[in-house]
Amino acid sequence: MSVLAPQVQRWSAGNREVLWQRITGRHIPLDPRTLEMLEGGDPRMEALRRRMRSEFMLADGPQPDVMALIPVRSRLVLLLPKASVLWAPAPEVRTAGGYGYREIALDPAELAAWRAINDSRNTATVAARAGVHPYLVRALLRRLTASDVQLLQLRTTPPRPRDPSLQRMVSPPRPDAPRTAEQRGDAGETTLSAYHLEDITDGETHFDDRETTIAHALATPHPSLGGRPFGQALFDALKGRDQVPTSGLIVEVGCGTGEMAASFWLQAASASRQYLRIDLSPELLHTQRRRAPDTAGVLADGTRLPLRDGSVDLLLSNEVMADLAAVPWRPGTPREGAAAQVAERVARYGLSVVTETEGPPTLFNLGAWKLVEEVARVLRPGGHAWLSEFGAFDRDPEETRQLDHPEVSVHFGHLLQIAEALGLEARCLPMAESVGLDLNARQLARHSHHALRARARMEGWHLPARAWTPEQLTKALPWPAKGLQWVPMSEEGPGPLVTRFLVLTLRRP
Ligand SMILES: C[S@@+](CC[C@H](N)C(=O)[O-])C[C@H]1O[C@@H](n2cnc3c(N)ncnc32)[C@H](O)[C@@H]1O
């Protein structure tokens, strides 16, 4: 006979067995061998048995008294009071873009009960506060603690703030986004030329729906930047370090929507300066022209700049280097195509690389190296460059799997070595420090943004991906939503995680 309580469901999720307490909506994931040892009465399982007893999961342990337990809401669900529905992710619908969402309709009694749940009242008090018969509250809890719903947990004590189990579901792993044949070259390197030239077809929504950047999430004035948009904060930071030229050419490589160009140029515009946008996407160049009409744009590749040597006073490139070619290569293996270019540069610049013989070959940011070489060529003496991307100082590049195109994190240590070898003064610092971004300022949590975006899509309107503050979001939403979560800028909001971003600043002596 099983040691598990009759209300415990069991299923396999990858290499784990999940035990789900049907009444409380609580679960424990276990290694299958551990479960065998538990079932076999192994005395080494005593600590686990104690934990399972406290979670009402053992047949010979206590059983849950629903009226005495505290209902606690998942942080992933929203209440849309006007529609009288819960708007919730479906645990079993997992796509590369995130969860699928669905409505769970509530009748007036259920709505009153849901509203009375406050993470510290027990079920009996919730029923009394809501003026609803306890039987109805129990029926609602039973619906919402089911493993295919996962919107409530019943607990013996209130949760700790930011309890991670309330911010995720037990779901199949998120699948990798599909890749097309054009996104890899002959040496297995990432190549996004076709993606940028042809696959970006809606510049207005691309950065809301397919790849949100920090500059886009912060394109409207934001408290984390002292009430300024990103481009203005960058201008002020560079001006404060004397890096904005009084005259001459400012070049931005890879400008996305043009929002950064627009707010930077609003500060920098003068008759003696020019702002040139360089981008590989014809569609985005159109969007940029609409957003920043007083700047010039050119369709070109940032790794082959159509600019004369020593002609640029300031070069900006924000979140572009991860799009540039990254090449898998193992030192000591044949050098052909892109791999040969990596090998030649590793030797030329004396880059430190670890020779692993096991596992997949290391990725090298060949495209970002070429961008730095181009910067060294085009900067005039005394000129500056500011290049940002996600990555680390000394970690091998890794490919992201959720986007519809492969992006690769940047090894900034290699960039610094290359820049110095090319005679540039180089410095690497965190993005937040570089633009003076307050990591404690608040923004909408990513999962709340995903829920709202899914609802907007269902209703046929568009929600931009901004680092929403409560005041901004109230103005943007056509209806009220309850259950929204707010996090500091150091955590995941609608845009990428700021703390993963570094900046390389360069100066030609
Ligand atoms: C991730 S977006 C960043 C956009 C913008 N800088 C921002 O932070 O929102 C990358 C941008 O670089 C452009 N891009 C990608 N590869 C490029 C290349 N090889 N040369 C020039 N532009 C490129 C893309 O079209 C896009 O505008």
Image (tube, helix red, strand yellow):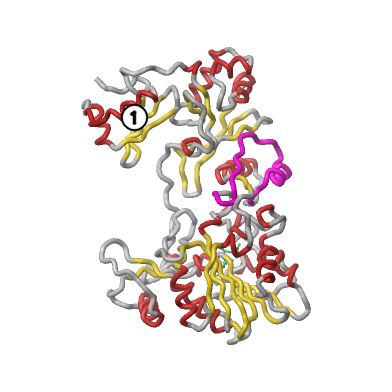
- Quadrant containing the C terminus is bottom right
Residue 128 image position (x, y, % from top left): 61, 14
Frontmost residue, 390 versus 102: 390
Residue 289 image position (x, y, % from top left): 70, 68
Please tell me whether residue 477 belongs to the stretch shown in magenta. yes
Residue 174 image position (x, y, % from top left): 43, 46
- Quadrant containing the N terminus is top left
Residue 32 image position (x, y, % from top left): 27, 36
Magenta part of the chain: 467-491
Horizontal placement of 61 versus 478: left or right? left
Residue lying at 59% horizontally and 51% vertically, measured from the top left: 489
Amino acid on which the number 1 mark rests in the picture: Arg
Frontmost residue, 155 versus 199: 155
**Label 1: which secondary element:** strand
Residue lying at 77% horizontally and 76% vertically, measured from the top left: 270
**251 w.r.t. 123: above or below:** below
Q: Label 1 belongs to which residue?
A: 10
